[in-house]
Image (cartoon, rainbow, N blue to C red):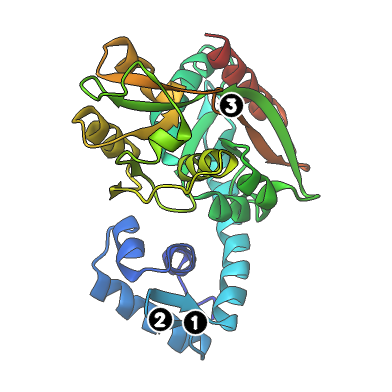
Amino acid sequence: MLQHLRFRQLEMVRLLLETGSVRAAARAMNMTPPALSKSLREVEAIVGRPLFERTARGIAATAAGHDFVRHARVLLQGLEELRDCGQTVGGKARPVLRVGAAPFINWRIMPGVLQGLARVEERPRIQLIEGRIITLADQLVNGELDAILTLFTPEALQVLEQDALVLDQIYAERTLVVAGAGHPLADHEATWARLAEEDWILPPQTFSQRLIVQRGCLEAGVLPPEPAIETSNIPAMLRMAMAGLGLAVTFESTVREDLAEKRLRVVRIEGELPAVPIGLASRRTRADPRPLQALREAIRGYAAR
C-alpha cells in the first residue's frame, strides 16, 4: 500500500473528511472535482474498501474512512516535522507554530497580534488555519495544530474542555449591536422587545453572534427574531448593516474602525451584552513551549493596545 499511496492523496482524504464536500476539498487542493473523484477512487481501490459514501448534503466517511484518516494524520504530521527540520534562519532552526482560528479572528485580531510577535527576537514561523471550532479542536488533539485562538463561548468550551488540552483565557471581547448611520435606532437605547421587531442580519444558528441574540431575547421573555438576511460572511454582514438592511451583532474589535469613521453606530441595550472571553487552547504536551508563550504574550500586548 505504501508503494502506491502518495502523501497528497492522504491530504486529500483528510480534507474530504473535514469538509464533507468534494468541491471544497478540490478547491483547497487546487484540483477539479472530477480529478479529485478519480484520485479518491484510486485510493479506495488500493485500500480495498469504500472510504466515503454520498449523502444528501455531500459525502460522509465510512468507518474505514475514519480509520484511514486517523492513520493518515500521523503520517502527515511526521512529514510536517521532517519539513520543519530544514527550516532555518541564520543557521538556527526556526520553530513553526500552527494556529487555528475562526475567519473573523484571522481577519481582525490576528494582524495586530502578529505585529507584536514580529518584534520577538526568536519569533516562530506562523501557519494560520481557518475553520469551525469542532474541526479545529479535533486537529489540535490529533497534533495537526499547536494552538487555537478562539472565543471561549459555552458552545466552544463543550468541545475544548478535555484532559488533553489546556485553556488559557487572555482577555474579553465586548459584544455590540450595530446599525447603519441612518437607522432609527442608531445611537439610541432599545429594549429586546423593540429589537425583536427589527430586521436582523445574522450568521447561521451555530455561530456565537446568533446565539448571543437568542439568549438576550429569551432572558427578556421575548421570542428571538428570525433573520431577514442570513450569511456566514461577517464582512458582508457588516456591509449590509451599513447599507441600512438591518441590525447586526458583532465583537468590538471587528468594527472599531467602522465605529470611529461613523460607518456603523452602536445600538445601546438595557444592560450591556456579555463580554466573550478570548484565549488559547493548546495541548498539554509540547516539546518546546517558547513559541506558544511568545504568541500568548503577543495576544496580551494586542489586548492592552
Q: CA distance from mark 3 to mark 2?
A: 39 Å
Q: CA distance from mark 1 to mark 2?
A: 13 Å
Packing grade of label 2 (10 A; few <14, some 14-19, many >=20) is: few
Residue at 81 percent of width and 50 percent of height: 163
Packing grade of label 3 (10 A; few <14, some 14-19, many >=20) is: some
**In the displayed structure, would residue 206 be above or below residue 176?**
below
Mark 2 lies on a secondary structure that is strand
Residue 21 as seen in the image, left or right of residue 128: left
Mark 1 lies on a secondary structure that is loop
**In the displayed structure, would residue 214 be above or below residue 48?**
above
Give the image quarter of residue 268: top left
Image coordinates for residue 284, horizontal then vertical, percent: 78, 42
Give the image quarter of residue 97: top right
Mark 3 lies on a secondary structure that is loop
Which residue is more in the foreground, 40 or 154?
A: 154
Residue 11 as seen in the image, left or right of residue 68: left
Task: Check disc 1 and report the residue beneath it.
Answer: 51
Packing grade of label 1 (10 A; few <14, some 14-19, many >=20) is: many
Which residue is more in the foreground, 192 or 272?
A: 192
Amino acid type indicated by mark 1: Leu
Task: Check disc 2 and report the residue beneath it.
Answer: 55
Can residue 4 be seen in this snapshot?
no
- Disc nearer the start of the sequence (3/1): 1
Image coordinates for residue 150, horizontal then vertical, percent: 57, 37
Image coordinates for residue 169, horizontal then vertical, percent: 69, 28
Find residue 275 and name its label.
Answer: 3
Image coordinates for residue 176, horizontal then vertical, percent: 45, 26
Amino acid type indicated by mark 2: Thr
